Image (cartoon, rainbow, N blue to C red):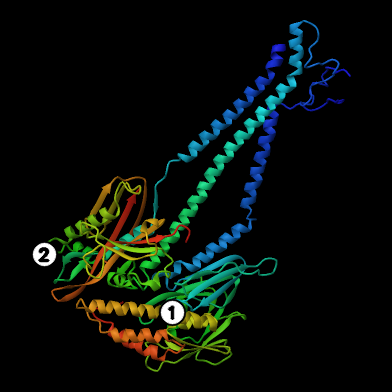
Amino acid sequence: MGIKRGKNNRAQLKTKKMGNIKNQGFLRPRKSNDFLSFLAFNCQNIRGQLKIQQMIFMLLAITLFFSLVGLFFLTYSLGDIKQGFIDIQKENAQKIVSILSNSAEFSCSSKRQNCIDMDKALIMKDREEYIKFWQVDSIEIRKLYPFEGKEIECSIGNYPNCNILKVFQKRDNGADLIAQQDNYVSLCRKEVKNGEIYEKCDFGLLIVGFEENEN
Amino acid sequence: MKINRRLRGQEEMVGFILIVIIVAVIMVIFLGISLNKPKTETGKKSEEIRSFLNAMSIYTTDCAINYDPNYANVKDLVQYCSRNEDCLNGENSCDVLEEDLTKITEISWQTGQNNIKGYQMSINSTNILIFNGNKTSQYIGDYISLPAGIIEFKVYY
Amino acid sequence: MIKNKKGIQLSFAWIFALIAGAVILFLAIFIAARFLDIGEYKTDTETAKRIDILLNPLQTSFEEGKVTKINLPKETEIYNDCSTSGNFGKQYISLSQESFNKFPRPGEKIGFENKYIFSSNIEQGKIFYIFSKNFEYPFKVSSVIYLTGKNYCFKDMPSRIKNEILGLKSGGSAENFYLENCPLDSIKVCFNINEDCDVIIEDKCKNDCENEFDKGIVRKDRDVMEYSTKTLMYGAIFSDEEIYECQTKRLMKRIENLAEVYYDESQFLSSRDCNTGMEPELLQLQSLSQSFDGNFILLNEIVQEINEKNIGVCKLWE
């Protein structure tokens, strides 16, 4: 069974190039001492193996290339989705903060937006029945202007000479809060001067803390 | 001839690698162009700025008009400032208004933080114009209508 | 031994072209499928987003009088469940979308303590109308939400209520409210008239109300629902008796808590020389709302007294 080396036989199965046992002794060179003939003979024999190696290299390169493309595409699209999710969460959190500042428990008037009755907010401090009501982790009110120079937490004893009112905090350690959303509000209270009572409003911030996946 | 036949596979490999490199370079260029698109000027209303303006307009100043302690809030003070009236303590209402608005905006919108490059506040019925930082092509703004004028506020990013 | 060694020898360029072509074809089909709106996930996400509209933006005091119309892609059942347990009770909402002419079991219930939705126990349709009103009794308690998918025909209304309905219709979204040329399937709502009406509203004001129909009774089939304030009147019109009673009880729980807050605030202000004089009435309001059984007579009296006292610089609410 000889192997005819013609055009028809040029493209042969890549896995087999052994050919005629009689004529091809890959591991057993001819007894001829012709070194060049030996080389030529072996080069033809190992052509198939070269082709295999080339094919493997090419497939590896293609796989690597398309995986890089795919990785890049995934990173971009996932990043976009994640940003979209974060934007929706932020939007929802902003709405909840807005609802909170206009709710009956904090709002100073149904006719004024973003106005908090500080007297009422002080009364709301640490009311246990409201802890689950708002579906938030913490509520804090900070006076931004005028500022006393240092941070003073509000209590019944030092009010209104203070600037941080922690209405409630679900977690024992406030540092565990994952996300916070805030809203500018005016902080209004009843003030007495010269025997007259008037309304005094400061400028502040309502800060609401959320768990990451609550909204 | 033998040399040519031996090198054919290598020629094909080199050709293949060249194609891959060219495609990769084109993709990187395309990506670079799409990420570096020049940003056009945008003016979006923001809930945050709306809340800021609402809260700021009710702030009670130290300017008492008519009698003590009838202190005016920002809303009322804009009206007095447009008529160039003075407070009971002798200060000009516009000076008090400008000072308070400057401090409130300074505390609330600190340039350099949260990508804020600058801000501008103006009241159309007065000469008050508060500006800090730098103007850029991208900003978020809103306004509030008061009986005596409009307060417009823009934050530049 | 391989006898036939004929085969195809592909160059690397061909192989690369084939593989790249296959990948590009796949991407094209994938992108086309995404844009053709085949996925169920997109429908569910849109529906969930629209229900989010229902639950959030109507809760601020400045959204009152605005009707929002929700268009859903499929026939949907919205389940409204209400519970009075706990400090504030709870509002549950869940949905079920039509699939092969059937409504499967509704999805997971979403619960809220700070929302009050008046509607039938099950509202079915593709189009729903939502609007809100503030409930003040005597102070602002909360915004309440009305949800309906049905058509309503209002007959012989007093002018104040007519103007209110016209105000809702002026936004363009309240297409389900009719004052004339009512569709045959619409629910007829009549004021003080006992014709062939589905819902009859009886005015119980006897010179003790600011406006007519501020308090009264709503009759629906065999259900009789007593109300006080127009906010609860609309609640009785648009919801089942079971939901109406539950939501009213929840609102009373909120009033109870708010009355306690205002009582404490009143005492605090008194210590700072700002006397309201409302402490006894606020305590009574707290007690009456705690024991609310559907009867508004005593509550109306105490609310009126409190309103008369909430004046001056030391007023607790506006």
Q: Is residue C171 above or below residue B30?
A: below
- Secondary structure of the residue carrying tag 2 is loop
Chain of the residue on which disc 2 is drawn: B
Q: Is residue A114 left or right of residue C231?
A: left
The number of numbered discs placed on residues in the rendered structure image is 2
Q: Quadrant of the C terminus of chain C?
A: bottom left
Q: Residue C24: x, y in percent?
A: 65, 39
Which residue occupies the extreme top position in the image? A33
Work out whether disc 2 and disc 1 sit on a shared chain. Answer: no
Q: CA distance from mark 2 to mark 1?
A: 49 Å
**Amino acid type of the residue tagged 2 in the rendering:** Asn
Chain of the residue on which disc 1 is drawn: C
Q: Residue A114: x, y in percent?
A: 33, 66
Q: Is residue C289 left or right of residue C18?
A: left
Which quadrant of the figure has residue A144?
bottom left
Q: Residue C86: x, y in percent?
A: 46, 76
Q: Residue at x 55, y 80 (%)?
A: C152
Rendered image: mark on residue A187: none
Q: Is residue B146 visible to the viewer in this orientation of the structure?
A: no
Give the residue at mark 1: C251
Which quadrant of the figure has residue A134?
bottom left
Q: Residue at x 35, y 55 (%)?
A: B141
Q: Residue at x 46, y 88 (%)?
A: C293
- Contact flag, marks 2 and 1 (Cβ < 8 Å): no
Query: Is C89 or C248 nearer to us in this picture?
Result: C89
Give the residue at mark 2: B89
Q: Quadrant of the N terminus of chain C?
A: top right
Query: Is A28 or B36 nearer to us in this picture?
Result: A28
Within 10 Å of disc 1 (Cα), the crowding (few <14, some 14-19, many 20+) is many
